[in-house]
Amino acid sequence: MSDKQLSKYSGVLADWLVEAGYTHCFMVAGGGCMHLIDGFRTRFTCIPVVHEVAAGIAAEHFNECRSAGRAFALVTTGPGLTNIVTAVAGCYTERRELLVIAGQVKSTDLLAGGLRQRGIQEVDGTSVTRAITVRNTCLRAPIGRRAFRELVFAARGPHPGPVVIEVCLDVQGALVDRPALEAEPDAVVPAAQAAAEAARVADAAGRLADELSRAERPLLLLGGLVSRQLAWESLPALEQLGIPVMTVTSAIDRVPSDSPVHAGRPGSWGGQRAANLLMAQADVVAVIGAQLDLQQTGFNWQGYAPGARITQVYPCAEELAKGHPPLAVGVNAAPDDVFRRLLPRVRWRDTQGWREYVRKVRELVPVLEPANTVRPGQVSSFVVLRSIARAARPDDILAISSSGGTFTGGLQMMEVARGQYATTSPAYASMGWALSTAIGAALARPGQRVIHVEGDGGFAQNLQELAVVRRQNLPLKMFVFDNHGYASIRATQKKFFGGAYVGCDEETGLGSPDWPALFRAYGIPARHLEPDEATPERLAALMDKPGAEAWIVHVDPDQSNFPAVATRLRPDGKMESSPLYDMLPPLDPVVWSQVSRYLPKTR
């Protein structure tokens, strides 16, 4: 075969990615991926970012908010790969799609025999990422189309998560016989196997429908593995059925805040008190696409929905078998498949006035806790976060930080309109996520404005990506909440260690920049938000200008942060927590008597 009939492998890989639906590549260039760059540059919209972790986060939230196409991340070998590991871990815990294509040294230079390094900037990326990926491999020789597509599609499910593919430098640039690599057809699921799976899913949906139909006080809890489109398409049926619906932190946009069936957001971090109270009083809880980890159930998981039969649909046998909390029914299946078949089968009738009770509890226990106070001249972060959401247009995207007060406060306070995207990464809860989240969302939905909220400590960890905001001319409206450092760490040190502060603010050695000057250095207008501007009307007017803009919101570092789960440090050093429904500060006894009708009588 002559050279004219051969194809460069990097270009072949690019074409296969195009076939798989990828349109955007978030990347940091490097010598270890130079052939990949050459093959990808004409096939994809390539978005250079400054740090590799931003490439992973932006690709994650591009795919979360995508209108068309998909995004992946491209990094070089060694530090290029290790820099993206945090983003990979975040998607692994969140069970979100992320494809990372990484360069690697030549196949002849790979580590062997206990060496720590042989090739230039070499690290064994496959070993580094093995515990936080659903699939990973190093291509030491070209593989065929079928094998490559199986790797790529593993990121999407049925057990979604990160896939990392290292490609050795000589493999990237190899000339290959493309027809031979594409000769093997894609695998096809046998009809009998597909029919058996469909029957299993239908049976599971029927069992869950029976549970809900027999309940007196049912709740639906939707998680991030229920797709937005299915949740939005199902909203009329949900509202007609009338069963109260809650959402976990990764799914706050699945049910709009103004829906008559919306019953709040339970949980420990950012959980709403009314929602936690209602969860504890349900007799059946159907959990669809949500992981019942300690962030959701609280550390005292024995007190989670104590009177309920809990059913859970989740694509992970280990999750369903872990035993906390115990399940009445566990279904290992794709949540969308079960949810799609569930609603038409439910025959629930509200014979006990449960919907009215849910409405009453949510009315008597407001989301904005009166106990949250600030010093004179300061604004409440809770009030500002609620005002930002109310100032947003229905087609705005809300990009919420994944750590600190803007994370927990945003999940408590921010209202979501019908069909509005709100995206965050709560499972890993890492600082530095929201700016890259906003970048990915903005590029996924061109022309839509993105409202981004993040604390100063988190923003400082990824602020270099302001260069991408300016270069791509993205319509980001950024609110940086300045509490002089790490307010959540400060609160922990105050609560458990008597105010022995270290490394949490400027007074204890943590530095922060002149924020308006920093934004101006990137060509982005920025100024401090005045206290009287923290209203929906004023904020809507401020955000009405085109282009990127930023506002610095001064937050009282000692602002109280209620409601909070009662937790104490025992003399033996162990932590002891109350159930989620028993939050601080205690409710007024009269109110408590009205909102605790079905609670266990142990308080």
Image (spheres, rainbow, N blue to C red):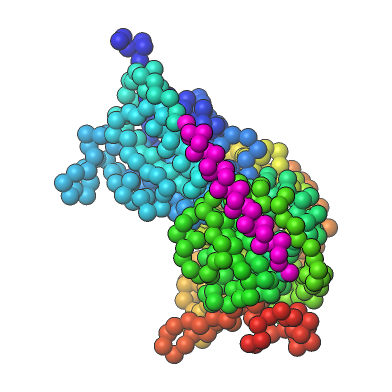
Q: Position of residue 177 (x, y in %)?
A: 34, 18
Per the picture, the main secondary structure of the magenta-coloured stretch is helix
Q: Residue furthest left?
A: 113
Q: Relative to 41, is 309 on the left or the right?
A: right
Q: Which residues are magenta?
A: 188-216
Residue 249 sits above or below residue 12 on the image: below
Query: Does residue 272 appear in the picture of this structure?
Result: no
Where does the N terminus fall, quadrant-wise? Answer: top left
The residue located at (36%, 19%) in the rendering is 180
Between 594 and 35, the one lying in front of the other is 594
Q: Relative to 29, is 233 on the left or the right?
A: right
The residue located at (59%, 71%) in the rendering is 268
The residue located at (65%, 51%) in the rendering is 339
Residue 33: which quarter of the image? top left
Verify whether residue 591 appears in magenta.
Answer: no
Between 346 and 83, the one lying in front of the other is 346
